[in-house]
Image: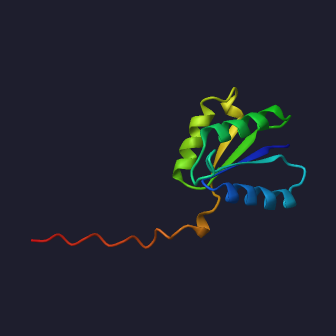
Amino acid sequence: MTVKLVVVSHSEKIADGAVELAVQMAPDVLILPAGGTDDGRIGTSLERVMAALEQAADANSDGTVVLTDLGSAVMTAESALEFVADPSSVLLADAPLSKGSSPPLWPPRPEPTPRA
């Protein structure tokens, strides 16, 4: 079984770095970055995700797994899936890509005390 990977990140550098590292561990697997915006800013690009998914679909494989970093990257990947010829061949993984480097959300901040 051979699957392809698409790494969707808000940062082009994170996507490229994750791919660079993963290729060292799985040199025979097609792993594609889809990070950042077209003008080099932090954000996600529907066009970049769609291009990576199209490239992965063109390769003979058993499907594509998409890894994302933050919430809106998930939404961008979900939007791109609407344009894929065979969405059943793509799995949007519920797995962290760069969560360890994000600011912690736990413990939650205390609720403000209402004034009487």
Residue extending farthest left: 116
Decide: is 69 above or below 114: above
Decide: is 66 above or below 89: below
Total number of numbered labels?
0
Whole-percent x, y for residue 73 in the image: 57, 48
Whole-percent x, y for residue 31 in the image: 79, 49
Say which of 11 and 56 sits in front: 11
Decide: is 98 above or below 2: below
Judge left or right: residue 1 versus residue 7.
Answer: right
Residue extending farthest front: 39
Q: Which residue is drawn at 85% across and 43% down?
A: 2
Q: Which residue is drawn at 62% across and 47% down?
A: 39
Judge left or right: residue 113 versus residue 56.
Answer: left
Q: Residue at x 74, y 60 (%)?
A: 17
Q: Which residue is drawn at 60% across and 68% down?
A: 100
Snapshot quadrant of residue 11:
bottom right
Judge left or right: residue 72 versus residue 6.
Answer: left
Snapshot quadrant of residue 20:
bottom right
